[in-house]
Amino acid sequence: MLSIQETANEPKNKTSAKKNILTILVLLLALGALAAAGWLYMNPPKAKNNSNTNDVSVKIDSILVSRKITQIPYMPTDIPTVFYTADAVGNVTYYSFDGAQYNELAPTGTFELSVPLSGQQIPVKIPYIEQDGVLTGFGVFSSGATGSDVYIYNFIIFKVCNLPSSYAADGKCLLLAFTDQTKAYSLDPVWEEAYVLNRANGTTERFLSENNRMLGINGAVRADFCMITDTALTADTAALPFFSGRGYDLTADTETKSDIYVKNGAKETRAVSGVADRYVKPLGGDSFAFIRNNGNGFDTVKYENGAESVITTFYAGYGTSYIRSGDYLLSKEDGRIYTTYDNTVIETVGYKMNPMVFAVSPNGKYVVMAGTVANALDYRIYVYNTETKKYATFTETNYAAHDNMRFIDDHTVAYYIVNVEGYENVVLDVSKVK
C-alpha cells in the first residue's frame, strides 16, 4: 500500500517543483528589472547625436529682428528694401528697411491721374519711388474719400511700374489696377486693368486689348476679361501670358474659370484652357508653367510652342493638401516642397506641423513655415537649411493668423499677424540656422 501511495503523490510533487522554479525565475527577473532601473537612474541615456535634427523648440526671440504693431501692414514693392502702407482714404507712405527697422522714405514724385474705366474718369494720386532704374508706386481710389462723381467703383488700387523689357519705351511706364478690396493685402495681386502711361502728360492707352469686353450687372466692364500678374510681367520676351474668363458665362464661377492668353506684340491668342489658379511662370520664349486640376488632384504643366506637357502629377487637392507660395508647392502631409516649373523636390527634415504659410528664400537656401503642432495654441516657426540639412523650430507666443510670409533678402523673412491692436509686423533673421 505504501508503494501505491508514493506513486499517486508523484505528480503533485512535480507540479510543486515547477511552481517553485517559476517563482524563482519571476523573482530573478524582478530583481534584474530593479537593477536595470537603478543603473539607468544612475547612468541616464545620452541623446542620440544627430546633427540633422533639433526637436527642441526655442523662443523666437533668438532670431527676431523686429516686431512692430501698425494699423496697416507693410507691403512689398518692386524694390526689395522698399515697402509701403496704403489706407482706404488714399494715403500712401513708403518705408525703407535697413536690416533692422522700417524708416519712412520720401517719394521721388507723384502722378496725379484721371484714369478712364467703364466710361468714367477715376481720379487718383500715385506717389512713387524710383531707384536704380526701377519704378514702383501705389495709389488708392476711394469713392467715400474723394467726393468724386464716380458711382460704379468704391475702391481701386493702382500701381505704376516699369514696362516689360520687350515693351519698354522712353517716357512711358505701366499702370495697373484692381478693384477687389478684400485682396488689398495680397502678395500675388491679379491686376484687372493694364495701361501704358505717358509720364509727361498723364495720358493712357490700353496695354491689353478689351475688344468685345462686356459689361457686368453693375455697369462695370468685366473684371475677369484681361487679368495679369506681377510674375507674368517678368517675361523676358514679347510673349506675355495673361488670364481671361471671357470664354465663360458671367453667371459661372469666374473666380476659378480662367484661360491663359498670350500677348505677343499687338496679337493676343488663347493658349491654355481651364486653369486651376491665376498663376503662371514665364520660362523664356513663349514657354510658361501653370497649374490645372485633373480628376484625382492636379498637375503642374509646361506650355511651349503650342503644346502642353505635364511636369508633375499630384494626387491630392490643390489649395488644401498642397499650398503654394510663389513658385513652390508644399505638401502639408509630409513637408516636401516642389517647384512648379520642373521636377525639383526639397526633402525637409524634422517636419512635424500643420503649416498655414511658408516661403523659400530667393537663393533656395532656407525654407520657413508657420503653423500649429499639437493644437491651435501650439504655434511654431520652422526653419530648414537646405544646404546643411539642419532645421530648428521656434515657439511663437502669438498664435493668431500669420500671413504674407515672404523673404526680404536671402536670409531675412517677414510676415504679419492680425491682432486686436492692428497688424503685428514681424521680421526674422534665419541665417542663425547653420
Image: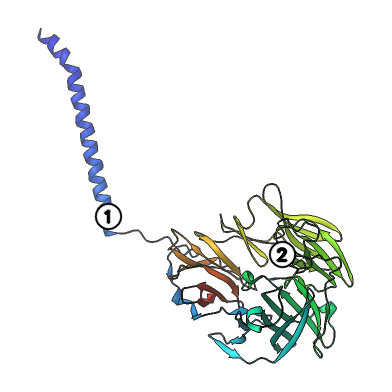
Corner quadrant of residue 42 = bottom left
Q: Residue at x 20, y 18 (%)?
A: 11
Amino acid type of the residue that numbered disc 2 sits on in the rendered structure: Tyr
Which callout, 2 or 1, points at the residue further toward the start of the chain? Answer: 1
In this view of the protein, which residue sits in the foreground, 311 or 212?
212
**Mark nearer the viewer, 2 or 1:** 2
Q: Quadrant of residue 326?
A: bottom right
| Residue 67 visible in the current orientation | no
Q: Residue at x 84, y 77 (%)?
A: 166
Image: 31 above or below 308: above
Q: Which residue is mark 1?
A: 39
In the drawing, what numbered circle is on residue 425? none
What's the residue type where badge 1 is placed? Trp
Q: Is mark 2 in CB contact (under 8 Å) with mark 1?
A: no
Looking at the image, residue 378 sits to the left or right of residue 24; the answer is right
Q: In the displayed structure, does residue 407 sit left or right of residue 245?
A: left
* Residue 13 point in image, percent of width and height: 17, 22
Residue under label 2: 279
Nearest to the observer: residue 261 or residue 175: 175
- Residue 89 lies, in percent from the top left, at 61, 82
